[in-house]
Image (spheres, coloured by chain):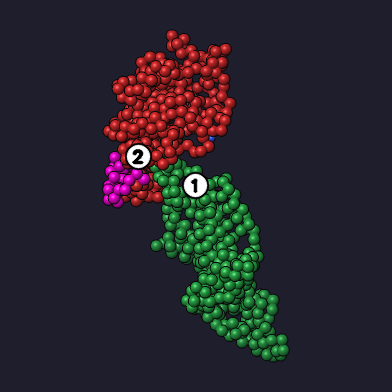
Amino acid sequence: MNSMMAMATDNRAVPLTDGPATSSPLLGVEDLGIAFGATKVVEGLRFSVDPGRTLAIVGESGSGKSITSLAVMGLLGSSASVSGRALFRRRDGEVVDLLRLSPGRSRALRGDEIAMVFQEPMTALNPVLRIGDQLVEVLRNHGRPTRGAARARALEMLRTVGIPDPESRLHAYPHELSGGMRQRVMIAMALMLEPGLLIADEPTTALDVTIQAQILLLLRRLQKSLGMALVFITHDLGIVGQIADDVAVMYSGRVVEAGPARAVLATPNHPYTRGLLGSAPQVDASGTPLPLKPIPGIVPSPVFPPAGCRFHPRCGEAKAGLCDRTEPVLEPTGSARGVSCLRWKEIAS
Amino acid sequence: MRRVLDPVLQIVPTVLVVSLIAFLLTSLLPGDAALSRLGLDATQEQLDTMREQMGLNDPVPVRYLYWLGRAVTGDLGNSLRSGEPVAEVLARRIPVTLELAVFGTGLALLIGVPLGILAAVRRDSWIDVATNLFALSGMAIPFFWLGLLLIMFFSLHLQWLPPSGYVPFFENPVRNLHLMALPSLTIAVAFAATLMRQTRASMLEVLNADYIRTAHAKGTPPIRVILHHALRNALIPIITVLGLQMGTLLGGAIVTETVFGLPGLGRMMVDGIYKRDFPIVQGALITIVVAIVVTNLLTDLCYRFVNPRIR
Ligand SMILES: Nc1ncnc2c1ncn2[C@@H]1O[C@H](COP(=O)(O)OP(=O)(O)O)[C@@H](O)[C@H]1O
Ligand SMILES: [Mg+2]
């Protein structure tokens, strides 16, 4: 409640959800900065996730999505310096800043209240340990389950994520499973203790298309049935409509557009969001695929970021003398939306 | 069962080839066994008779087959010097070298693996620098020199440990351990250095792996991440190095036994060469090679055990 009010009065702040105003966010990231040495890779990043809702973070490769999620998890190595706040509301109601937790307290939250699924199912599981042991370990890290209870829970989770013949899978090694099955195991492992927040970093990118759809459906179903909050990271704006309530579009370490997913997808305000929509596979009303229009150029290196708006060198709407001089901030555009573009009003009209 | 049987069968040709080489090496070595048996004042007639008796006049392939046929039944011939069966000499010598090898390997593992883990986890810290220095000097220092240094320091200077001699373990365990301490340390140092560097390298690689991040992501205590998740994977290349180093270890044992006056296989071989006692040399050589082959086999089985992907 308080943070919502604070965000609404701060002109840089944008509440990213249109949920009931009484619910305070489960996770509120404010002014997050991540730097490796002198290179600022993420700056002034802001987003929030409400309990039981799905936020998609979208952006091209290299825009800082993975390191943002690792920072929230407390998994960034000591080579990174992190600033800002990431306020997380625990089960017992206590609000903690994830960026300032002691290593011990951070560890106690990981796997219990916040869990993560990674992009590469082929390498994310330990190749020399049995699936069952890797699942049960989550319980051991956060309590003292009996052997029988731990096994039962592991079996239950394997069933929940749709793994056939779960009894024998408990004794299997990762290499005996396909990529899709391994990603299901990763999801089962993440959900062993029913965390309030699951961060999934491109969980379907490494899988082939039919499996992608299955995993997406599974995540959606589990998110609904467990009532957990989901941060779904992807480079594919085309997926966002299928899974997310809210969306935050990231470019070069900043949020450039945010708001309810349906609204943002229907009327994107930022030229980058429009570009992403054009480069995602789309179909017209009759179901025929529209031609892809990739955004020209690449994400700038954080070592030599362009002056002014970071997107201006690739932007069809950029105005010389303005966009290459002044850096835009995320400003509210009404109905829980925000955009970080100097010309969004002109473009919209 | 095949998993175990196949590698076992594979060592048969290796042992055969090595036995042939061992046989040829010793039978082609310069020096006349009959002469060295009878001494310099033997007459030509006596020498001829002795050569005939010892089968030295038969063609080499025939001699090899005879020798091999007896060898597989445990009859490795008799010492040309004492007439004692080689098998009996071996039975006395093998326990000494075995003890040295086991203690040396154990010490090397106890020193090398923890230091390697520490160096990897505290990469670029003073611990890393210090252990690297230890590894470099440990690998550079020759066995005999290290042995002499240890004797000078621990035996002559501190007078803590005896400089040489041997008492069987079951006769007097305490005395045995006292006597074996310095020789074991001597062969352990270079081995520990190699193990340390391999452990450090493979730990560094493994600690960067995705599954380590996963282990942290599920709230695994850091110690457990290192010892359970990382080390289990890092062990795979460490075990390979362990197997490959067995030859070096036994080579070190030969020198070390000489420095510390231990009556083991190495000394047996060296003495045999000096005395042109070919059956003795052959017996020792074959035993050492079989030991290397068998440890490689054990390494292979261990490797299969820790690496589920090739089971
Ligand atoms: N350990 C690191 N040291 C220096 N730069 C890094 C490191 N990790 C990531 N980066 C940089 O951070 C930027 C964002 O990376 P990442 O979060 O992986 O992007 P995304 O997940 O959106 O593809 C990239 O430019 C990358 O080069
Ligand atoms: Mg990424």
User: Which residue matches tag 2?
Assistant: A112
Q: Residue at x 35, y 26 (%)?
A: A25
Q: In the picture provided, is A288 more to the left or to the right than B23? A: left
Would residue A159 be counted in the magenta stretch?
yes
Residue A166 visible here: no
Q: Are marks 2 and 1 on the same chain?
A: no
**Residue closest to the eye, A239 or A62:** A62
Please, is residue B11 above or below residue A96 in the view? below
On what subunit does the disc labeled 1 rest? B
Q: Residue at x 64, y 65 (%)?
A: B149
Where is residue B282 drawn, in percent x and y? 59, 75
User: Which residue matches tag 1?
Assistant: B206
Q: Residue at x 56, y 24 (%)?
A: A305
Say which amino acid is labelled 2. Answer: Asp
Please, is residue B293 above or below residue B261 in the view? above
What secondary structure is the magenta-colored segment mainly? helix
Where is residue B297 drawn, in percent x and y? 49, 63
Residue A319 visible here: yes
Magenta range: A141-164
The local crowd at label 2, few if under 14, some if 14 to 19, many if 20 or more residues have their Cα within 10 Å, is many
Q: Colour of chain A?
A: red
Q: Secondary structure at mark 2?
A: loop
Where is residue B135 drawn, in percent x and y? 60, 55
**Residue closest to the eye, A280 or B106:** B106
Res A349 → quadrant: top left
**Disc number lying in front (2 or 1):** 2
Where is residue A227 drawn, in percent x and y? 29, 32
